[in-house]
Amino acid sequence: VSGDPNNGGGGAREIRSYEVSFNKRHKEKALKEYLPFIVATAKAIKDQERSLSIYMNERYDEWSPIGLQHPSTFDTLAMDHKQKQSIVDDLNRFIKRKDYYRRIGKAWKRGYLLYGPPGTGKSSLIAAIANHLRFDIYDLELTGVDSNSDLRRLLVGMTNRSILVVEDIDCTIELKQREEEDEEQSKSSSTEKKKAEDKVTLSGLLNFVDGLWSTSGEERILIFTTNYKERLDPALLRPGRMDMHIHMGYCTTEAFRILANNYHSIDYHVTYPEIEALIEEVTVTPAEVAEVLMRNDNTDVALHDLVELLKLKKKDAIEIEGKQAEEKKDANEIKTQSMQVDEKKIVDEIKTESVQVEKKDDKKVVVKNDFTENGSG
Ligand SMILES: Nc1ncnc2c1ncn2[C@@H]1O[C@H](COP(=O)(O)OP(=O)(O)OP(=O)(O)O)[C@@H](O)[C@H]1O
């Protein structure tokens, strides 16, 4: 194997070539198996070494990149191991399926919807996916995009092997159904109509992502995040739109152990039984746990602080529960009282009615008597 120093010079990029010799009888194997293997391995190494970037749309139709140095990986991610494995498997399957996507005539892209409360690791999961695949991230801030045409320009300007992220999709875009948009447009003047047509909408984004964009590039991942799945437009939740819905939940005992291992490199500590019992009882986000564990380098102190935080949360939860129970009791009492009042009213009304009927009956009797009297008289 030899390097080639004659490569143009003058500050140009060095191009190196290698010479590999084989025995003639191995020619077939070398050309069909060995060289393709070398090329694929070299590409994988290059991809692995390539530094990643995160692009943001600071100007309305332009991306600006900065280096992505987020340390999150699937190993450091605190989540249920089965769920984690199913995401990794899905990503690995997706990457290997170039021919499959071509064969079935579908664009080589995959969509993930991440949902769950703030601080449960949605951003950390996105970084872990980027680090796992060695894909750049395009973090699309929709509120900074003025029109659908700018949005298209941005999307077309993305490279292959990249992840398009739209965070807090429930807040950043007017969630309107297509029919509503059409109805509104038919009411307005022609200039207003043109403007409205070009306004960034969820359907505009989804149409473009499903249509032109996905056929103009390859190996694209699309990730939407939300803290409130129930607020999302049904168009986004339709089967086939987002391939996988991933719930990011509160801290579990399993997640806690991963975090403790990340921050203090430990597998066990005497405080674990107490911490784990408390974690089962309270709602605490992985971000809150991570913050306490990170605050102190001394493991004993950090774990003690965590016990204190969890106890405090438990106390608050008991107080809130007590208050809610009292409020419920008060509400029930008011309900019972008003029911009693209602019942009394109904009884009074029935009484009044029956008195009226009786009076009427009396009258009838009187009339009857009169009649009888008259009749007999
Ligand atoms: N599941 C997790 N695994 C590992 N670290 C986590 C996890 N969840 C939260 N963290 C820690 O908490 C910090 C904040 O979490 P992150 O930003 O990923 O949450 P998020 O769900 O994206 O929140 P938001 O909805 O507010 O953007 C992270 O930098 C990380 O240190």
Image: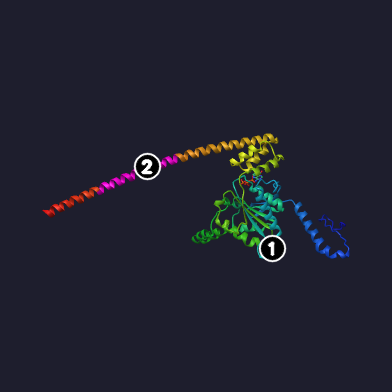
Could you tell which of marks 2 and 1 lies nearer the N-terminus?
1
Mark 2 lies on a secondary structure that is helix
Can you see residue 376? yes
**Magenta segment, principal secondary structure?**
helix
Residue denoted by label 1 = 100
Q: Secondary structure at mark 1?
A: helix
Q: Quadrant of residue 61?
A: bottom right
Q: Position of residue 200 (x, y in %)?
A: 58, 56
At x 12%, y 54%, the residue is 376
Colour scheme in use: rainbow
Amino acid type for the residue under numbered disc 2: Gln
Viewer can see residue 140: no
Q: Residue at x 29, y 45 (%)?
A: 351
179 left or right of 43 in image: left
Residue 341 coordinates in the image, percent (x, y)? 36, 42
What is the quadrant of the N terminus in the image? bottom right
Q: Position of residue 5 (x, y in %)?
A: 87, 56
Judge left or right: residue 88 versus residue 333. Answer: right
Picture quadrant of residue 13: bottom right
Q: CA distance from mark 2 to mark 1?
A: 70 Å
Q: Which region shows up in magenta?
A: 330-357
Residue on which disc 2 sits: 340
Residue 221, placed above or below residue 312: below
